[in-house]
């Protein structure tokens, strides 16, 4: 017959329920932390993607209509070249210009509302 240790801290782990329970709690805590880390990472990625989407669409949503005369005048004052065409009842206008570093860009307008700038 095997002798039992007189105190729980002297017993081997296999015989000590306290140590087994502590290991289970520690393992559960690590798993909970991993789950929280995954949720946190997913939440952060979602927030970043949503912020980028809102930033990309904000100029379109907030675009104010300006007259073709104003578009042409501002394009001319920037040293740019203005063009306009009507297709399917929509007026499309562009302004080709160069920034102060000599890089070419084109601004796009539909019915007087700015919607994009692209490099040339």
Image (cartoon, rainbow, N blue to C red):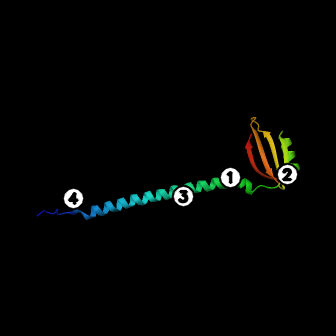
* Mark with earlier residue (4, 1): 4
Q: Position of residue 29 (x, y in %)?
A: 39, 60
What whole-number distance in Å separates the C-alpha atoms at marks 3 and 4? Answer: 44 Å
Residue 99 vertical placement versus 36 (above, below) = above
Q: How many marks?
A: 4
Which residue occupies 73% across, 44% down? 118
Lower position in the chain sequence, tag 3 or tag 4? 4
Please, what secondary structure does the residue beneath circle 2 have? strand
**Which of 45 and 88 lies nearest the eye of the viewer?**
88
- The quadrant holding residue 7 is bottom left
Asked if marks 4 and 1 touch (Cβ < 8 Å), the reply is: no
- Kindly check if marks 2 and 1 are in contact, taking CB atoms under 8 A apart as contact: no
Return the mark for residue 56: 1
Q: Is residue 92 above or below residue 4?
A: above
Q: Earlier in the sequence, mark 1 or mark 3?
A: 3
Q: Front-most of 104 and 58?
A: 104
**Which residue in the structure is indicated by mark 4?**
12
- Characterize the local packing of mark 4: few (<14), some (14-19) or many (20 or more) Cα atoms within 10 angstroms: few
Task: Give the crowd class for mark 3: few <14, some 14-19, many >=20 residues within 10 Å.
Answer: few
Q: Residues within 10 Å of mark 2 (few under 14, many from 20)?
A: few
Earlier-in-chain disc, 3 versus 2? 3
**In the displayed structure image, the side of residue 104 where residue 37 appears, left or right:** left
Q: Which residue is mark 3?
A: 43
Sequence-first disc among 4 and 2: 4
- Which-is-in-front pick, marks 4 and 1? 1
Quadrant into which the C terminus falls: top right
Residue at 57% from the left image edge and 57% from the top image edge: 46
Q: Which residue is mark 2?
A: 86
Find the distance from the CA under tag 2 to the CA under tag 1. 26 Å
Left-right relation of 11 to 93: left
Closer mark to the observer between disc 3 and disc 2: 2
């Amino acid at each position: 017959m095997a002798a039992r240790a007189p105190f729980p801290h002297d017993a081997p782990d296999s015989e000590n329920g306290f140590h087994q329970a502590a290991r289970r709690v520690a393992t559960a805590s690590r798993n909970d932390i991993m789950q929280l880390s995954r949720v946190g990472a997913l939440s952060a990625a979602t927030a970043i993607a949503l912020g980028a989407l809102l930033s990309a669409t904000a100029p379109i949503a907030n675009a104010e209509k300006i007259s073709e005369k104003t578009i042409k005048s501002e394009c001319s004052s920037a040293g740019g070249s203005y063009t306009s065409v009507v297709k399917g009842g929509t007026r499309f206008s562009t302004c080709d210009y160069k920034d102060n570093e000599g890089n070419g860009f084109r601004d796009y307008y539909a019915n007087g509302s700015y919607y994009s700038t692209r490099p040339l």
